[in-house]
Amino acid sequence: MSTIIGEALPNIPWQEKPEGTNSPVWRYSANPIIPRNAIPNSNSVFNSAVIPFEGGFAGVFRCDSRSVSMDIFAGFSEDGVNWKINHEPIVFEGDEEITKREYRYDPRVCKIDDRYYVSWCNGYHGPTIGLAYTFDFKTFHQLENAFLPYNRNGVLLPRKIGGNYAMLSRPSDTGHTPFGDIFYSESPDLTFWGKHRYVMGTVDGDASAWQSKKIGPGPIPIETDKGWLLIYHGVINTCNGFVYRMGVALLDLDQPWKVKARSRNYILGPEELYECVGDVPNVTFPCAALTDAATGRIAIYYGCADTVTGLAFTTVDELISYMDEYPLEIEG
Ligand code: BMA
């Protein structure tokens, strides 16, 4: 048995694992929970992040518009399933050199101490990691970009490590990056980042081919008594393009750049029609996970085919025993 270290969330969205399911993660029966036209001018709503807020839930959503401009929007929900997303994108307060928008996508939301931090892929002469905080999901204060271009998938840890803020990310290139490993960085003040450490990379050969092209951190890592549970995305290049699936790893609590365990099997991949067909086919892309420390339940929010948003369920025990059952040999 493993336990989640954190708060109880009795109203976490939840469905029991259906009989006869082989996978450690199972989908919400009424997926997708957010359609592509959830707001009047959206082409697609996907790769989005949610968090408990004031007894219900709040979130930051990637909505590509009908001119296919990528931006992020705040939204609210009482049950974590039915969402009301603002019709206008978030307007950030801060230094105009930084708030000037090129594009914004793939947000994550992380509560640290008294505030909610949003990180996202931010256009600033190339993709990098945008960072902001809010107390109320109405006013957002933008901070300096965390890194130089090019970087994607900036994912904060929900508490300081050795007195510093900590972030996982995936250095990239200007385009649809055909490579990428996960790195760890620390900052004393969320402005100056250093102590860059390699966490883990793609897997060569056929040991775990679904993650042979690139990988990137997904939801905010989940603190457990065994380590940080990291759900991430992994990509294979096929004759028909990239396929995005989800994997799981366990990172050391005090030195999160050290990988303690990793699954060679994916935990969820494109199988349902809404995951296989859309603007970009064959993409399941996790950006958030709600957790209930009282029961070990985990609800994963993921983008489906770059078009709609899905919800899936698992538990801390399911994920940790799956890594035991299907381990990937850890390098070094
Ligand atoms: C990645 C990002 C994601 C997207 C994925 C599949 O590089 O752009 O936003 O979901 O590609 O298109």
Image (cartoon, rainbow, N blue to C red):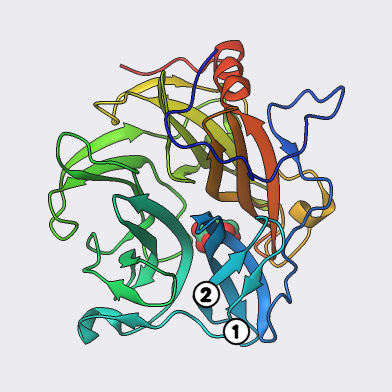
x, y percentage for residue 234? 54, 41
x, y percentage for residue 31? 79, 53
Residues 220 and 59: in front is: 59
Q: Ligand 1 near label 2 (Cβ, under 8 Å)?
A: no
Q: Quadrant of the C terminus?
A: top left
* Tag 2 and tag 1, C-beta contact below 8 Å: yes
Left or right: 59 in relation to 127: right
Query: SS at mark 2?
Result: strand
Left or right: 215 in relation to 285: left
> Of all residues shown, which one is farthest toward the right?
19
Which residue lies under the disc numbered 2? 73
Q: Image point 14% across, 55% down: which residue?
A: 189
Ligand 1 falls in quadrant: bottom right
> Of all residues shown, which one is farthest toward the front?
55
Q: Image point 23% across, 59% down: which residue?
A: 147
Vertical side of 82 occupied by 245: above or below: above
Give the residue type that dot 2 points to. Answer: Phe
Which residue lies under the disc numbered 1? 87
Label total for image: 2
Nearer-N-terminus badge (2/1): 2
Residues 5 and 17: in front is: 5
C-alpha distance separating marks 2 and 1? 8 Å
x, y percentage for residue 165? 22, 46
Vertical side of 235 occupied by 322: above or below: above
